[in-house]
Amino acid sequence: MGHEIAMQIKLAKERNEKVAFILPVGPMGMYKWVVYFINAWKISCEHVYTFNMDEWADSEGNTLPADNTGAFKYAMEQALFNPLGELTVPENQRNFATKDNLPTYPAKIDALKAEGAKLILVYGIGRMCHIAFWEPQFAGEYASAAEWENAPYRIAAKIHPLTVEQNAFTSFKSRTTLVPCRANTIGPGLFLKADYAIGGADGTLGRGMQWQGMSLWMTLRHEKTPWITSTYIPTIPGKLFFLKDLAGPLEAECN
């Protein structure tokens, strides 16, 4: 995934074009490879614009301070922006999903695309098949699929209980009570505008245990529906990287 992101930055530079990325906080290991290849190729990221897809929030949409180690902005600075050094993305071209800045995403992305910039979605597939924190239960609040598809973002979106559990496993050392119940997040009205998508599924836990196999299968096999957000992903050109164990067969076994 990291190499693919770096390649898209390189290709845009060679075309003398701007490029915009919708970025997740995870899998974080990909960013060290973005840094590796960008530094090896000595490519300035002055043409790159980034939009973090989500951020933990309280019930009013307030996010953690940027220097809090649990903040997504902090994570991105430590894993990507700071290690890039002089080649990094200019600060005024980095966007984070605060309650004030997230509503500016649609206009900023539209302006970049109008200038010929390619919009690239980088994503993981949630346990409940979310993309960003766009959860399945949101579908019940829209009159039609078309209305759902045009929704650009949510402030203080309610997180699905299984998403809380997923993040407890992957980010909070099993401490479920530390996982926020809300987040600011982009919606399909933004991620479906992507010209290219780079996805990843690495949800294995060892000893035959995993949490992401069924989510991956549903993403690739179920018909497109707002009730399963990730079923829209196969409609976007791109690449999806996944660990072999997640491809099945998904059968019970005793270890």
Image (cartoon, grey):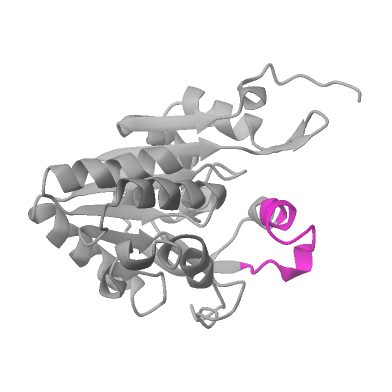
- 18 left or right, relative to 224: left
Question: What segment is highlighted magenta in the picture?
Answer: 165-181
Among the 4 quarters of the image, the one containing residue 93: bottom left
Which residue of the protein is positioned furthest toward the right in this rendering?
255
Residue 165 is situated, as x and y percent measured from the top left of the image, at: 72, 54
Give yes or no for residue 168 being in the magenta stretch.
yes
- 171 left or right, relative to 94: right
Residue 137 is situated, as x and y percent measured from the top left of the image, at: 54, 51
Please tell me which residue is depicted at 36% across the width and 44% down the height of the picture.
5
Which residue of the protein is positioned furthest toward the left in this rendering?
115
Give yes or no for residue 44 being in the magenta stretch.
no
Residue 48 is situated, as x and y percent measured from the top left of the image, at: 25, 58
- Give whichever of 165, 46 is nearer the camera: 46
- 239 left or right, relative to 138: left
For residue 120, say whether it is visible: yes
Residue 231 is situated, as x and y percent measured from the top left of the image, at: 44, 34
- Give whichever of 242, 251 is nearer the camera: 242
Q: Is residue 195 above or below residue 181?
A: above
Please tell me which residue is depicted at 35% across the width and 80% down the height of the picture.
100
How many circles with numbers are drawn on the protein? Answer: 0
Among the 4 quarters of the image, the one containing residue 154: bottom left
Among the 4 quarters of the image, the one containing residue 242: top right
Please tell me which residue is depicted at 12% across the width and 43% down the height of the picture.
15
Q: Is residue 33 above or below residue 20?
A: above
Q: Is residue 37 above or below residue 68?
A: above
**Quadrant of image for the N terminus:** top left
- Give whichever of 75, 111 is nearer the camera: 75
Please tell me which residue is depicted at 55% across the width and 72% down the height of the picture.
71
